[in-house]
Image (cartoon, helix red, strand yellow):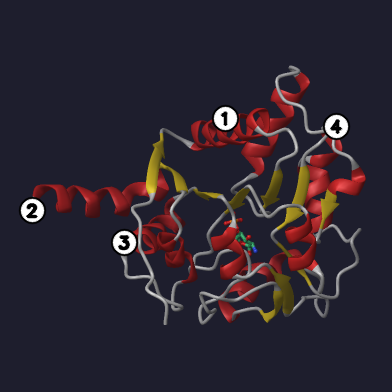
């Protein structure tokens, strides 16, 4: 086994969800300004919605230009049409891409050639991820290996439980295609977003426990350039732990 370094994750505690969204948008805007042909990998879920609203605002104010940016979906359900309202492709257009000057040819969703597509784009410059309450990032559920690549996965029971309310009976996808942990760790920079009380435990564990497959998000500690942005609610447990460490 190659020796595996762990790094301190830079943590920004935002006052509230709005501040989290503005801070994250600032990171994205800075990255696009520094490199207009940025390869940007994006998540779905509730957490990044404020970030997308903020990026649309920056675009309308002519402070950001997406015309040369490439967009990569982190993950997608298997067996849903792209235009299904719950598909992650539909989500990304609805929440963000429809409102900015993206070029359709620069938008990618995971498929069997995804690793090759990413390589051809020069690899991911900035990857943004949320975190599941079971510690998943993208759809790397507990048990995912650190070296995993883009692949088809079975969704965990806890993930399916949360999805049920959004799907008609019989329509619930049980599999997804997701970038792997290895894919995430090869991105040049990672931004982890966490918002709300229900993420407080998992956020603290991901940043402070020894990296392991039990909690895939903990592998982010093996990446040298991760910024985690949490609002006060999501950072509550992390703050207690880091405070104790400073005291002792
Ligand atoms: C989903 C997605 C993840 C996302 C996570 C958290 O299952 N596959 O990419 O980060 O759940 O979602 P939310 O932000 O709604 O809590």
Which numbered circle lies on residue 248?
2
Residue under label 4: 101
Among the two numbered marks 2 and 4 on one chain, the one whose residue lies closer to the N terminus: 4
**Labelled disc at residue 26:** 1
Sequence-wise first label, 3 or 4: 4
Horizontal and vertical percent position of residue 47: 59, 48
Query: Circle 4 sits in a helix, a strand or a loop, which is it?
Result: loop
Q: Position of residue 68 (x, y in %)?
A: 81, 36
The residue lying at 78 percent from left, 33 percent from top is 66
Q: Is residue 134 visible?
A: no
Q: Is residue 19 left or right of residue 170?
A: left
Ligand 1's quadrant: bottom right
Counting residues from the N terminus, which is met first, the one under dot 3 or under dot 1?
Answer: 1
Q: Secondary structure at mark 1?
A: helix
Picture quarter containing residue 130? bottom right
- List the single residue furthest toward the left: 248
Q: Is residue 30 left or right of residue 242?
A: right
Q: CA distance from mark 3 to mark 1?
A: 26 Å
Label 1 Cα crowd, 10 Å radius (few <14 / some 14-19 / many 20+): some
Whole-percent x, y for residue 44 in the image: 68, 54
- Mark 4 to mark 1 CA distance (whole Å): 18 Å
Front-most of 42 and 82?
A: 42
Any mark on residue 208, and which?
3
Q: Is residue 70 above or below residue 22?
A: below
In-front residue for pair 74/6: 6
Residue 201 sits above or below residue 215 on the image: above
Dot placed on the residue nearer the N-terminal end, 1 or 2: 1
Q: Residue 225: tell me if it is visible.
A: yes
């Amino acid at each position: 086994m190659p020796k595996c370094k762990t790094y301190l994750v830079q943590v920004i505690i935002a006052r509230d969800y709005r501040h989290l969204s503005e801070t994250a948008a600032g990171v994205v805007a800075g990255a696009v300004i520094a490199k207009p042909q940025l390869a940007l990998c994006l998540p779905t879920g509730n957490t990044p919605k404020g970030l997308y609203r903020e990026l649309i605002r920056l675009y309308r104010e002519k402070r950001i230009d997406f015309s040369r940016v490439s967009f990569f979906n982190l993950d997608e359900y298997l067996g849903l049409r792209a235009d299904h309202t719950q598909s992650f492709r539909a989500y990304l257009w609805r929440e963000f891409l429809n409102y900015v000057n993206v070029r359709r040819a620069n938008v990618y969703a995971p498929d069997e050639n995804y690793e090759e597509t990413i390589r051809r784009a020069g690899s991911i410059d900035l990857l943004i991820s949320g975190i599941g309450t079971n510690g998943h990032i993208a759809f790397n559920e507990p048990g995912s290996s650190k070296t995993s690549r883009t692949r088809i996965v079975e969704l965990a029971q806890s993930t399916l439980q949360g999805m049920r309310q959004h799907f008609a009976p019989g329509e619930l996808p049980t599999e997804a295609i997701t970038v792997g942990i290895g894919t995430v760790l090869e991105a040049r920079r990672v931004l982890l977003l966490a918002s709300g009380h229900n993420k407080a435990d998992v956020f603290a564990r991901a940043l402070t426990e020894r990296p392991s497959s039990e909690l895939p998000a903990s592998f982010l500690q093996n990446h040298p350039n991760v910024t985690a942005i949490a609002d006060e609610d999501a950072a509550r447990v992390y703050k207690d732990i880091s405070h104790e460490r400073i005291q002792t």
